[in-house]
Image: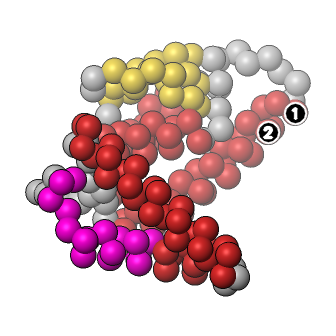
Amino acid sequence: QKTAYEISIGDWSSDVCSSDLLWLLLSGIYKPILVGFGVASVILVLFIVRRMDQVDGDHLTVALNPIKFLTYFIWLLGEIAKSTWAVTKFILSGQAPQRQHFFDIPYSQSTDLGQVIFANSITLTPGTLTVETEQGDFQIHALDYSDEDLEALADMDRRVSAIETGRG
């Protein structure tokens, strides 16, 4: 693996070109002054990223299967919709939460990114919140707890583990 000092001009130029092209395609603005600002901002960001790499050398490897991730994302949107409906009915009923509960749920993800996806998926689902992370498990708060919550979270855990490359 190259250090920041060993990165060649070719690496820089290819990063700048690909980042500028992406910026240009996403912005859809082709005025010379804005394209110039875009090039300048990309160069500045790449410079900062390379300098940061000199300091800590910390890298995030994205080891996710894109097809499985897409199917997980679609499934998660469905779960969010179902949970939103359930929480909306609960709130509109005017009842105070009777079954709020804190509990721990173990996770099986092998990467930090997988653990973040799992914890954020729990938080994105209305009625549940990832409160704390510990080695091996997350502490969860549920607005309307039932025993089925453990089964649903275990299913979510399996699905997130399956999107990690080299798993499931």
Residue 86 image point, x, y percent? 72, 40
The residue that appears at 43% across and 45% down in the rendered structure is: 117
Q: Is residue 9 magenta?
A: yes
Indicate the secondary structure of the residue bearing disc 2: helix
Magenta segment range? 4-19
Task: Residue 129: name its quadrant.
Answer: top right
Q: Is residue 44 magenta?
A: no
| Mark count | 2
Q: For the C terminus, which image quadrant?
A: bottom left
In space, the residues marked 1 and 2 are separated at their CA atoms by: 6 Å
Residue type marked 2: Thr
Residue 134 image point, x, y percent? 34, 21
Q: Is residue 162 visible?
A: no
Secondary structure predominantly adopted by residues drawn in magenta: helix
The residue that appears at 58% across and 25% down in the rendered structure is: 142
Residue type marked 1: Leu
- The answer to whether the residue labelled 1 contacts the one labelled 2, judged by CB atoms less than 8 Å apart, is yes
In the picture provided, is 52 more to the left or to the right than 2? right
Q: For the N terminus, which image quadrant?
A: bottom left
In the rendered image of this protein, does residue 158 appear above or below residue 62?
Answer: above
Residue 56 image point, x, y percent? 25, 37
Return the residue at label 2.
88
Indicate the secondary structure of the residue bearing disc 1: helix
Return the residue at label 1.
92
The residue that appears at 50% across and 40% down in the rendered structure is: 120
In the rendered image of this protein, does residue 58 appear above or below residue 131?
Answer: below
